[in-house]
Amino acid sequence: MFSQEIIDAIVQAAKAEGWPASALLAVVECETSGKPFEQDGHTPSLLFERHKFYSELQKHQPSKLKSAIMAGLAIPKWSRNTQYKDQGTSTGRLNVIAKARKIDEACMALLDRAEKEGYF
């Protein structure tokens, strides 16, 4: 279960967005298996979505899409075989996020903004 500090932050974020706090708490609990941060203690626990990185780069930074594909970070549609292959550990997830940031910091800025605004 989450610490009171984490619960309070999730409740505050839900209120700010007009969402039921219980719904956001349930989503965070389910999506993070009860561990809201990676091992570095500040990066939100998440799975990097290669198909979303592909679509965001295609829309906003098409010149960077080839680099992302070559690095194995972008795929045109969700695939069970490749989507989360290297994200089985916190270290793996942090490495994927670091590689994506090198390709396009702006596409990763949403994660940073969410952290700064207290959503995580």
Image (spheres, rainbow, N blue to C red):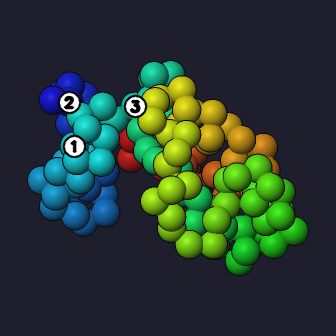
Q: Residue at x 67, y 53 (%)?
A: 73
Give the residue type that dot 2 points to.
Answer: Phe
Q: Residue at x 51, y 67 (%)?
A: 78
Q: Describe the element under mark 1 as helix, strand or loop.
A: helix
Q: Quadrant of the C terminus?
A: top left
Q: Residue furthest left?
A: 22
Assess disc 1: are there few (<14), some (14-19) or many (≥20) residues with their C-alpha within 10 Å of its C-alpha: some
Mark positioned earlier in the residue sequence (2 or 1)? 2
Q: Residue at x 80, y 55 (%)?
A: 70
Give the residue type that dot 1 points to.
Answer: Glu
Q: Which residue is mark 2?
A: 2
x and y percentages locating residue 80 in the rendered image: 46, 59
Q: Which residue is mark 1?
A: 29
In the rendered structure, are the residues bearing label 1 and label 3 in contact, judged by CB atoms less than 8 Å apart?
no
In the rendered structure, are the residues bearing label 2 and label 1 in contact, judged by CB atoms less than 8 Å apart?
yes
Q: Quadrant of residue 53?
A: bottom right
- Separation of marks 2 and 1 at Cα, in angstroms: 8 Å
- Tell me: residue 52, above or below residue 116: below
- Tell me: residue 99, above or below residue 104: above
Q: Which residue is mark 3?
A: 37
Is residue 97 in view? yes
Q: Quadrant of the N terminus?
A: top left
**From the viewer's perspective, is the residue at label 2 or at label 1 nearer?**
1
Q: Residue at x 67, y 60 (%)?
A: 74
Closest to the observer, 86 or 81: 81
Closest to the observer, 85 or 20: 85
- What count of labels does the image hold? 3
Give the residue type that dot 3 points to.
Answer: Phe
